[in-house]
Image (cartoon, grey):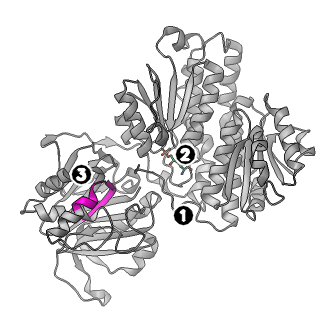
Amino acid sequence: MCGIVGYIGYREAQPILLESLKKLEYRGYDSCGIAILGSVARNDGLEGVPANRIQLCKDVGRVVDFEKTIPKIQGGTGIGHTRWATHGKVSAANAHPHTDCGCKIAVVHNGIIENFQKLREALIKEGHLFTSETDTEVIAHLVEKYYRGNLVEAVSRALADVTGTYAIVVLAEGHKEIVVAKQESPLIIGIGDKENFVASDVSAVLDYTDRVIYLEDGDIGVVSDRDITITNNGQKVNRDAQIVLWSAQEAQKAGYEHFMLKEIHEQPKAVENTLRGHISFIDPMARLDMGKMGVLKDILMVACGTSYHAALIGEYILGKLCHVPIRVKTASEFNHYEMALDKTWVLGITQSGETNDTLRALKKAKLLGCPTMAITNVQGSSITRIADQVFYTQSGPEIGVAATKTFTAQLATLYLLALSLAPIDILDIREYKKLIGEMKSLPSKIHQVLDGEERIAKHGRGLAKFDNAFFIGRGVSYPVAMEGALKLKEISYIHAEAYPAGELKHGPFALLRSNTPVVAIAARDDTYEAMITSIKEIKARGPQVIAIAEEGDEDIGQFVDVVIPIPRIDPLLSPFLNSVALQLLAYYAAKERGCPIDLPANLAKSVTVP
Ligand code: AGP
């Protein structure tokens, strides 16, 4: 979380930093700030200051408001930050950049300095004056402490004192270069022509360049307008530039009111692109019977949030089609568990490829000798450098904090995996071909769900007046219900809980009231009858029930208040379609409540802290 940027080149840094920060606000938007080596322009009525001093502006709130309040600063070297608060409240003082005592060194940071308290106390004893409650400020003072005219040396010495995670950009008066460093938090350098860019991720630099260097842990770089020098452990290293496959256009709203809505509508493409190049290559006769080959004993999936829900659906599908023992753990919990892992294949699922808990989980699995694979959407992201194998979902950039198209693309990947591992005696050729055919129809069936948007919107708006909601499902639809509840709560702030339908009577029934709507995912599989029973039990207690059900289901309408019809598909594939309907339901509930849909309170897209 937190987005950091840097610019050095022949253009004015200020507009570039501000525009880049807007692109990174999904990483945090509590406060923002910039520091530019230059001078305040005199034509705005403000008093000018000598050139090439650090000009620091920072405040709470969004970049779009911040930019209206700050003076025009002239200068071609600068750094910027958009914050998701970890240490210290949301305040202008705690906003980055942070500076040394004399405001001659400025630092932006993403990560957590674990030993900051001790360092801070020692620095205060040495006479340093602190102005914020943040962990970051110690870096500025440490660089000041070690600075003897060589900035990169001072940064290296400062970083030797800190423990924790960081991506930093350091700017100092008297220097024609900026210094960057990375440890467990993402950082890229965008390569321009007589200019260079630094950012937490590529979306911030796509307007300016498609050539980037992905820094590795331990890298310290010196970036000037024409040169980039990187060292690691004191040795000069060569980091090849890579061409970014995303375009700047893909990261625009393209006329949609919110990124989330655009991304919901991009799901047919995201699923199609993820399946493309894989689905036709799965030879039904050449499926890998990993179990029999003794290669694979079991699978463990680790992930967080929406990616965790994808993993749970994957658990169901892999279990059903492959009969391989499968476990799923939220990555943060896996890190606290001692699990028996013996040749366990560990899959880390993360759209951003930067979720700290998932990265840690995969590193732990590697240390335990497990083969690992990452499923991610972001080229060059940190997880791609940890896992033995990487499978990229092809969703394009996802900007809205609520994951949508990356989720369905993750599902597509997990279904592909299940199909390629499914032994012939569990899934015979005929069933196999039928399932492949159904998967190929997914993009058009998702389009059909989207065609019903207005109807779903009406029910979404109807949900907006409630403060609580339940989501229920059974079998493969239970994690779908979990995902529906997560979507609703994160963007509309309606308290939503998901339960396996059969569990409600073991406690949560006590909460059922007429003002607690229940969204029931009623897939037409072997759970259907049991779901109808659950719905009847719920209705007997007063709540309104909205069912997501297969079109043409004549029965369910008698028991529920609202039916949202979903195109017919093999029930195993119903999570794709039902999830899209639930995303729209949540979106329109949030819109009706006037919520900031793309940037929900207290959340960041990429959770790079433990
Ligand atoms: C999804 O809507 C959430 N914003 C969040 O739960 C997210 O899925 C989670 O933080 C994991 O992110 P990742 O896929 O990038 O690892």
- Residue 336 image point, x, y percent: 44, 39
Tell me if 113 is positioned left or right of 122 in this view. right
Q: How many marks?
A: 3
Q: Which residue is mark 3?
A: 181
Q: Residue 245 sits in which quadrant? A: top left
Residue 69 painted magenta = no
- Residue 168 image point, x, y percent: 27, 56
Tell me if 462 is positioned left or right of 285 in this view. right
**In this orientation, does residue 565 appear?**
no
Looking at the image, is mark 1 or mark 3 nearer the viewer?
A: 1
Q: Which residue is mark 2?
A: 305
**In this orientation, does residue 96 appear?**
yes
499 relative to 32, above or below: above
Give the spatial CA distance, label 2 vs label 3: 29 Å
Dot 2 amino acid type = Gly
Q: Residues within 10 Å of mark 1 (few under 14, many from 20)?
A: some
Q: Residue 68 got which mark?
A: none
481 relative to 258, above or below: above
Magenta residues, start to end: 107-119
23 relative to 125, above or below: above
Dot 3 amino acid type = Ala
- Residue 365 image point, x, y percent: 40, 30
Q: Which residue is mark 1?
A: 601
